[in-house]
């Protein structure tokens, strides 16, 4: 099934781009009535939040590498992260982890360690979005355009979303056990990892903080698009922060298009149209996609120019040598 989805991704990507065009067209009357302008101060704030988000999530990935016994200098991780991130937009959903694996292997990190750390990171960001969504939806019951359909189910949906988070904190070793079960199927040695309850809770808190920073990045970019009063910004900030985490997660798990293109924007529109208006919600969603993509391209270029690799270190010891790697 996954192979079929991967082969059809170019089709899904074309449909997603068509959806964005049709969405813009449907909101054109409202869009044409706005006086659009870019506020440089809010753009700068958005860029700073974006940089802070990247800095934090790279550190989270390094700590997850440490969990499985691999260690990577911070600036080497920055280079690998950004040179791989731009491959998310290539259909297939395999190129980013493949690039990270190959680049880490050049630095002596076993492929199993890199792939496991990437899988842990992807699971972690999904888990970290749940408390934010649960708090927002539990307090507001606001599902955007779907409120009438889903509001009565909010308590049940919130509870279901929090169950995996509780499982992760109470018994984080199940992730390692799951990975080792897969490795055994391919006659690979098991990973010896150190993921305690304390370290699991710590990386989860870091991932939640990362979501809040990305939400602040999106909110600041939205505030840069037109004039808002201070009271409006205070009222809209929780909607914008929570909506971005929810929409990104929906796009991430959809698997239909590279990096959730179209899916994330559609989810943002559904969640924010009632509070922002359809026109501004559409522009904010698309602007965030362009803004982050531009940032990733600039970061990848800067990594190539300023973080050149000269002589990668020798191969590190095998992952199965000793139970290293508890999160520092």
Image (tube, rainbow, N blue to C red):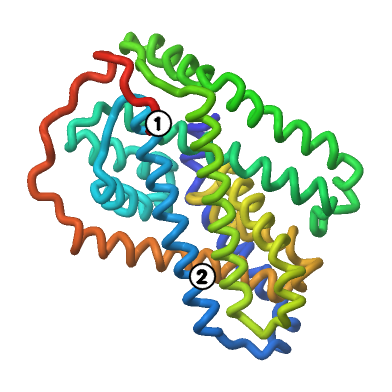
Q: Which residue, given by chain and number where applicable, does mark 2 sit on? A: 46
Task: Specify the farthest residue to the left.
Answer: 311
User: Vertical placement of 176 versus 327: above or below?
Assistant: above
Taking depth in this image into account, of 54 and 6 the one nearest to the observer is: 54
On screen, residue 156 versus residue 230, left or right, reads right
What residue lies at 54% left-to-right and 56% top-to-bottom?
261
On screen, residue 199 versus residue 241, left or right, reads left
Instruction: Determine the image quadrant of residue 99.
Output: top left
From the image, which quarter does the N terminus lie in?
A: top right
Mark 2 element type: helix
Instruction: Determine the image quadrant of residue 73.
Output: top left
User: Vertical placement of 122 versus 239: above or below?
Assistant: above
Label 1 Cα neighbours within 10 Å, binned few <14 / some 14-19 / many ≥20: many
Q: State how far apart marks 2 and 1 are (Cα).
A: 30 Å
What residue lies at 66% left-to-right and 27% top-to-bottom?
166
Q: Residue 187, percent across and down?
A: 33, 9
Residue 86 visible to an observer of this rendering: yes
Q: Nearer the viewer, mark 2 or mark 1?
A: 1
Residue 266 visible to an observer of this rendering: no
Q: Residue 250, percent across and down?
A: 63, 46
From the image, which quarter does the C terminus lie in?
A: top left
Mark 1 element type: loop
Q: Residue 240, percent across and down?
A: 67, 63
Q: Which residue, given by chain and number where applicable, does mark 1 sit on? A: 327
What residue lies at 62% left-to-right and 60% top-to-bottom?
265
What residue lies at 30% left-to-right and 60% top-to-bottom?
300
Taking depth in this image into account, of 69 and 116 the one nearest to the observer is: 69
Taking depth in this image into account, of 48 and 263 the one nearest to the observer is: 48
Give the numbered dot on residue 187: none
């Amino acid at each position: 099934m996954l192979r079929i989805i991967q082969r059809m991704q170019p089709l899904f990507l074309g449909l997603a781009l068509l959806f964005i065009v049709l969405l813009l067209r449907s909101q054109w009357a409202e869009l044409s009535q706005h006086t659009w302008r870019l506020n440089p101060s809010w753009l700068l704030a958005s860029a700073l939040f974006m940089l802070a988000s990247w800095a934090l999530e790279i550190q989270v990935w390094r700590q997850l590498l440490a969990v499985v016994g691999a260690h990577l200098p911070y600036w080497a991780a920055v280079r690998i992260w950004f040179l791989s991130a731009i491959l998310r937009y290539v259909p297939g959903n395999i190129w980013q982890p493949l690039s990270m694996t190959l680049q880490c292997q050049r630095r002596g990190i076993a492929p199993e360690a890199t792939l496991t750390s990437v899988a842990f990171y992807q699971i972690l960001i999904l888990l970290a979005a749940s408390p934010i969504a649960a708090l927002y939806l539990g307090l507001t019951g606001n599902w955007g355009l779907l409120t009438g359909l889903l509001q009565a189910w909010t308590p049940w949906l919130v509870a279901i979303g929090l169950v995996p988070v509780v499982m992760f904190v109470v018994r984080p070793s199940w992730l390692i056990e799951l990975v080792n079960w897969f490795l055994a199927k391919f006659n690979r040695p098991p990973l010896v990892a150190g993921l305690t309850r304390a370290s699991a809770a710590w990386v989860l808190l870091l991932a939640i903080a990362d979501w809040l920073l990305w939400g602040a990045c999106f909110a600041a970019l939205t505030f840069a698009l037109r004039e808002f009063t201070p009271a409006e910004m205070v009222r809209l900030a929780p909607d914008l922060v929570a909506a971005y985490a929810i929409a990104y997660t929906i796009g991430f798990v959809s698997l239909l298009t590279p990096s959730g293109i179209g899916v994330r924007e559609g989810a943002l529109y559904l969640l924010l149209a009632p509070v922002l208006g359809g026109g501004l919600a559409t522009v904010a969603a698309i602007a965030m996609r362009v803004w982050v993509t531009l940032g990733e391209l600039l970061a990848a270029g800067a990594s190539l120019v300023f973080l050149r690799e000269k002589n990668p270190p020798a191969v590190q010891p095998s992952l199965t040598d000793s139970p290293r790697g508890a999160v520092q």
